Amino acid sequence: MEQESAAIYTLVSADNGMCDMRLFGRPEKSILTVCAANVCRSPMAEGIFREELRRLGLHRKIRVDSAGTHATQAGRRADPRALRVCADQGINLSGCRARQVKEEDFGRFDYLLAMDRRNEQWLLEHSPEPYRGRISLLASWAPGAGPEEIPDPYYGNQAGFDQVLSMLNAAVQGFLLQLRE
């Protein structure tokens, strides 16, 4: 893998909620949210992270992206139901596009947060040994004794997306609380 330079291009959420590309110094931390196709859970988690980081004034210090373990439709927008449930909460996913996890992601991101055990297992199987400690289940960061996995709402109805949004919000809040300590 190539050595990263001290300055990188990173997607940031502008004040209008759209993603744009700007040049910043190397972020202090970086997060990759991962699901299967990168059209439901991981872009929703990415959007929640971006909004919370912006609210906390940390959006220039922490880089966030999402990817899929089986993202066969690279460039596809998030599922319309994910777009809708997030928009209802003021979270804009219009800049999110599906992409496959790449080998360089394991070294580029400090945290690779899987939505379920299948995603976690895929990441562990494809990760170079030195980076395996960066992989965890996003739900494990939620405060309290919640579910271990974020279920895939793709084959369900809008209510499933509402439930997933709630679970993701709790997990992101827990993660950011731990990160700031």
Image: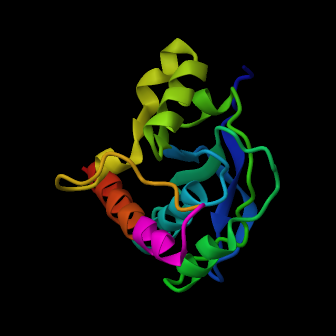
Q: Is residue 46 left or right of residue 168?
A: right
Q: Is residue 63 left or right of residue 116?
A: right
Residue 166 locus on image (x, y percent) = 38, 70
- Residue placed at 59% from the left, 29% from the top? 106
Q: Residue 142 location, x and y as percent?
A: 28, 54
Q: Which residues are magenta?
A: 155-165
Q: Chief secondary structure of the magenta span?
A: helix
Whether the magenta-drawn stretch holds residue 156 is answered as yes
Going 45% across and 54% down the picture, which residue do you hit?
151
Residue that appears at 47% across and 47% down = 115
**Horizontal and vertical percent for residue 137?**
39, 41
Q: Is residue 49 magenta?
A: no
Report the side of 172 relative to 98 (left or right). Answer: left
- Residue drawn at point x = 65 percent, y = 44 percent: 68
Whether residue 1 is situated above or below residue 16 in the rendered picture = above
Q: Is residue 134 left or right of residue 34?
A: left
